[in-house]
Image (cartoon, rainbow, N blue to C red):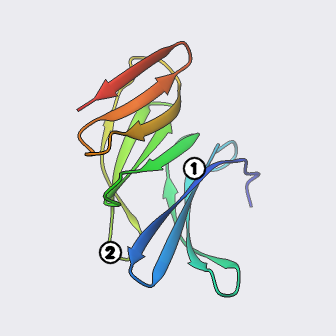
Amino acid sequence: MAEKTVKAAKTSKANKDKYVAYVSTYTRNSDTGIYIYDVDDKNGRLTEKDKVKITNSSYVTISHNGEFLYAITDFGVESFRILPDGRLENIGTASINGMRGCYLSTDYEDKYLISRCEGYGSSYQ
């Protein structure tokens, strides 16, 4: 197994009784940058569900409506639709003009995605 550094974890409610955790990592010796786990909160366990090939996903965030996950990568911000079972479907990439992002958030209406870059900030609609 590749050496992993956990940078961020978010939880999304995949359905009313089940939670899914998304863990982003630097990829060093692997091409897997996001690990998806089913969360068993009664027994305190995570079970790996899926992996996403992505380069150096240093931070993830989930939209307020729980429908989308955004990840900072070496190439900008990658967007994913969260499927009903919690897996991710890649829907696009946005450049952050050569800067390396370190934080992502959406506004409360999920109209804007805001990235914090080293020394700069950006927003996308």
Residue beneath the point at 49% across and 58% down = 52
Q: Amino acid at mark 2?
A: Pro
Residue beneath the point at 28% across and 29% down = 124
Looking at marks 1 and 2 on the same chain, the residue that comes earlier in the sequence is marked by 1
Residue 108 position, x and y percent, is: 31, 44
Check contact, mark 1 vs mark 2: CB within 8 A: no
Frontmost residue, 83 versus 111: 111
Label 1, on which residue? 31
| Residue 75: mark in rendering | none
Where disc 1 sits, the SS reads loop
Where disc 2 sits, the SS reads loop
Tell us which disc is closer to us: 1 or 2.
2
Q: Amino acid at mark 1?
A: Asp
| Above or below for 99 versus 38 | above
Residue 60 position, x and y percent, is: 50, 46
Q: Split into 4 quadrants, where in the image is the C terminus?
A: top left
* Local crowd size for mark 2, using a 10 Å CA cut-off: few (<14), some (14–19), many (≥20): few
Q: Split into 4 quadrants, where in the image is the N terminus?
A: bottom right
Q: For the view shown, which residue lies furthest in the top direction? A: 119
Label 2, on which residue? 84
